[in-house]
Amino acid sequence: MAEKTYLQAISDGIRGEMRRDKRVFVLGEDVGVYGGAFKVTLGFQEEFGAWRVIDMPLSETAIVAGATGAAIMGMRPVAEMQFADFVSCAWDHLVTVAAKQRWRAGTPVPIVLRLPSGGGFSGGPFHSQNPESSFAHIPGLKCVCPATPEDAKGLMIAAIEDPNPVLFFEHKHLYRRIKGEVPDERYVTPIGKARTHQEGDDVSVITWGAMVYTAEEAAQQVDASVEIIDLRTVMPWDKQAVLDSVRKTSKVIVLHEDTRTGGFGGEIAATIAEEAFEDLDAPVRRIAAPDTPVPFSPVLEKAYIPQVDDVVRGLKELISY
Amino acid sequence: MASTTAVDVVMPQMGVSVSEGTITKWNKQVGDSIEADETLLEISTDKVDTEVPSPASGVISEILVQEGETVNVGTVLARIGGEAGASAPAPPAEPVPEPATQPAADAANAAASEGQTVSSDAQPLSPPTESASGNGKSFVSPVVARIASEHGIDPTQVPGTGTGGRVTKKDIQAFIDAGAPIKASEPAPAPVAPADTPAPAHTAPVTPPAAPTSQEPQAPGQAPGQAPGVGEQFEPMSAMRRGIADHMRRSLDTSAHVTSAIEVDMSKVVQIREKLKKEYTAAYGVNPTYLAFIARATAETLRDYPWINGELRGDKIVTRNYVNLGFAVELADGKGLIVPVVKNAETLNLLGMAKGIADVAKKARDKQLTPDDVVGGTFTITNPGGYGTFHGTPVISQPQAGILGTYAIVKRPWVITDDNGADAIAIRSMMNLTLTYDHRLVDGALAGRFLRDLRERLQTWGEADY
């Protein structure tokens, strides 16, 4: 056990699997000599050589297509997008080929696509998005969104092991800001199992990624017992954990950093309405970013990304409802 | 007409836990004109009695609730201005939650801007119901409906604390935990999936059974409405009376009441009081009553007995570094009792204590107490001695651990030891004190030591002691 940053935990997860399994390799823009845009793969090329830590041309299409081909041939590629936003260039290979290959031809496509996502540092519209709901909507893809260092390592290992394409949304705002105890040994955090970040009785907050910490801070500012469920993975998502929490508290906020309309929170809210209607004591409340691109201006970005105050307000409304 | 919009006067929310109030007196009648903030009526709740000021100036067009009636918080009591019968929405007299207006306005704004809002989340919660018609109690959330159905409860009988008086899940659970009437003749129904033909027994509103079915006492106010017997008369029960009845019963059901008594020689206090009386009255306009002396000595003694100033809360014992003394005060009409609290009594000297007691007693008699004045007590003193009683067994004010009873000071022959060390019979001003304590927390020996120390303080009161 050692205290690690979220970023170190991701790095450790990949490095451990590369040492353990020769099929695992890394590819992406500047992942080798430079060590990756955020230095997740720093020192990897020295340890594993240029053939297992491949600097790719400036083409997300080539990266995802190359990873898909390698996976079909039996390899376990871990591909990096410098920013999650850029994955749209590779949409066709990811959605048309990687996601459907197994259903079409029975061939597993065990790729991991690392997607540094999220805002909070004035990165503007091309470097701040949280596109998990776009891919959660595509059958055949898995989407994981760890919030803690321990989960980041465990889910990375689970993603590499998984025979399906897994999109690994790693939140940039958490990279060096969040530290936590991470077991030294190898362990797998199962995909599809939520984590109770804190237990409570009065109102539930269902969230994932960086918003877990926003919810935690907000919960400290209200006079009520707030339960925070960290989904950890949005596809598949832990419906049972969410419904159990709703049955306990009967009041629920679904919180995410992604935009509101079509955001994954809508799916969760709808499921609660369908399956836990008779347990509700208040309308299901969504707190999310408005339906606009992410603004550059720090002031506007703050108004855009759900803040602690927004969650406090939502909690208070539900508590007094 | 000049004013076409009538202003509603609603039953105000007097404290968080108060859900209803009784009209005790209308100071104006229909057709009378009234100024804003002038007293329009007097109400009685289980916490306080108070006057309700008029929210607006105008002529009273309607009085909807008569004297003696008890209604829920938020109920419209009267209308000022407008034409009789017109029911335009208007600001309430007190900041009672008004769920319909603001969220509706917000929703309208949100709709107007087609969701192009910049704030991260501008969608307000929709109001719980079309509550323009009333106080929101009519909306029943899915979970409340299910629990009500499972327990055979009529949700409209449950006091609501949610927006506009809505019954929340917690409210109905508390109602059940407090021993709500469950269908007596049937086993409690298991949770059932929504059926096409729900069994009528589960959904029909259930009135309280005609006779108490368990040890849970029937609240007297809910007794079945039979006609009075020969020679009997019915008198409506005030909200305060019902509050007292419920509280007394609950206290006896909660605490293990034990009473210990001690005799105190008050001669020194009597003597000092005679001296101070003139000085305090002339200089400060305050009468140093015996009660003030006793309260001062009690606050001092409680410092050494934190459990008697404490509380059992769940499986924890609560102790405090302060003393909030409650004083049982009889209302002027003799039909009620209220326990205003002098906060931080441990910081008050004799003068401060006398003034504090006089202030809360006056407020109580003038019906000026606010909900804050009657909560937070850590120990209570009751003083029935004014009528000559020499002993009693008061009931503890929950959730406190003890209550001190003070009784008549009478001159009695008393065996003392004279200056020569010989026994002698003297005439002394004697008083009995009782400590009624919750034996769950306080044992008899501890109570005895407390009374001994309190007696010692009173018997040895020096002129320099304040």
Image (cartoon, coloured by chain):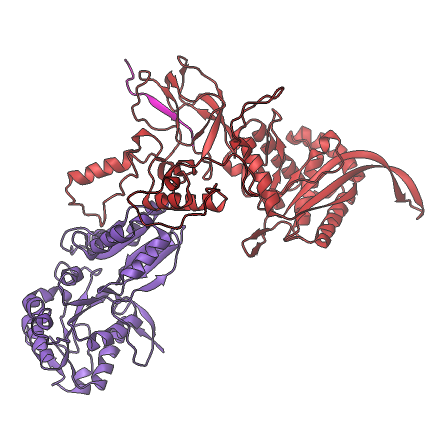
Residue at 21 percent across and 61 percent down: it is A121
Q: Is residue B18 left or right of residue A273?
A: right
| Relative image position of residue B58 (x, y in whole percent) | 36, 17
| The N terminus of chain B sits in image quarter | top left
In the rendered image, the vertical position of residue B405 relative to residue A139, given as above or below = above
Left or right, A125 with reference to A265? left
Residue A100 visible at all? yes
Our reading of the magenta stretch's main secondary structure is loop
- Does the stretch in magenta take in B302? no
Q: Is residue A229 left or right of residue B12?
A: left
How far from the left and from the top, in percent, is residue A7? 25, 72
Image quadrant assignment for residue A228: bottom left
Q: Which chain is the one coloured purple?
A: A
Where residue B53 sits in the image (x, y, percent)? 44, 24
The quarter of the picture where residue B215 lies is: top right
- Residue placed most toward the observer, B421 or A274: A274
Tell whether B226 sits left or right of A155.
right
Figure check: A106 above or below B374: below
Q: Quadrant of the C terminus of chain B?
A: top right
- Residue A40 visible in this rendered orientation of the protein: no
**In magenta stretch: residue B3:** yes
Identity of the residue drawn at 9% across and 75% down: A68
Q: How many marks?
A: 0
Q: Nearer the viewer, residue B374 or A280?
A: A280
Q: Which chain is red?
A: B
Q: Give the magenta range.
A: B1-12
**Residue at x 89%, y 42% (from the top left corner):** B415
